[in-house]
Image (cartoon, helix red, strand yellow):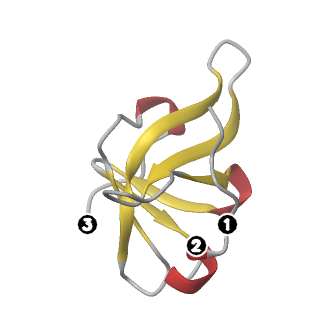
Amino acid sequence: MPDPVAWLVVELGWEVVSSDGEKVGVVREVLGDENADIFDGLAVDPGLLKKAKYVPAERVGVILEGRVALDLTKAEFDELDDYED
C-alpha cells in the first residue's frame, strides 16, 4: 500500500471514496492556505448534473497518491452542503 501524502499534493481529478468504499466523486478544488499550511477541505464533484459538495478537512481521512478517503459513508457524503464557489 502506498504511503499517505500531504494535502498539499492533492490534485484536481483525484478519486474520492467514502468510508464504506464507494466512489463518491473526484476532487474539484483543494481549499486552504498553502503558505500557512492550513487545510480547510475539499470541493468534491460527484458527477454529471450534480452539484459539488464541500467536505470539511476534519472529515478527510487518508490521502494516498491519486485517492482521497473520507471518514464519511456514502449516505453521509450525500447529505453534505453544496460547495458554493
Tell me the crowding category of disc 3: few under 14, some 14 to 19, or many 20 or more residues within 10 angstroms, Cα based.
few
Q: Residue at x 64, y 54 (%)?
A: 82
Tell me the crowding category of disc 2: few under 14, some 14 to 19, or many 20 or more residues within 10 angstroms, Cα based.
many
56 or 64, nearer to the observer: 56
Q: Residue at x 63, y 46 (%)?
A: 83
Dot 3 amino acid type: Met
Residue 40, relative to residue 54: is it above or below?
A: above
Label total for image: 3
Mark 3 vs mark 1: which is more N-terminal? 3
Dot 1 amino acid type: Leu
Q: Residue at x 67, y 66 (%)?
A: 80
**SS state under label 2:** helix
- The residue where tag 1 is placed is 80
Residue 75, percent across and down? Answer: 56, 85
Asked if labels 1 and 2 touch by Cβ distance under 8 angstroms, the answer is yes
Mark 2 vs mark 3: which is more N-terminal? 3
- The residue where tag 2 is placed is 77
Query: Residues under labels 3 and 1: Cα distance?
Result: 29 Å
Q: Residue at x 48, y 51 (%)?
A: 44
Q: Nearer the viewer, mark 2 or mark 3?
A: 2
Residue 2, percent across and down? Answer: 27, 57
Residue 1, percent across and down? Answer: 25, 66
- The residue where tag 3 is placed is 1
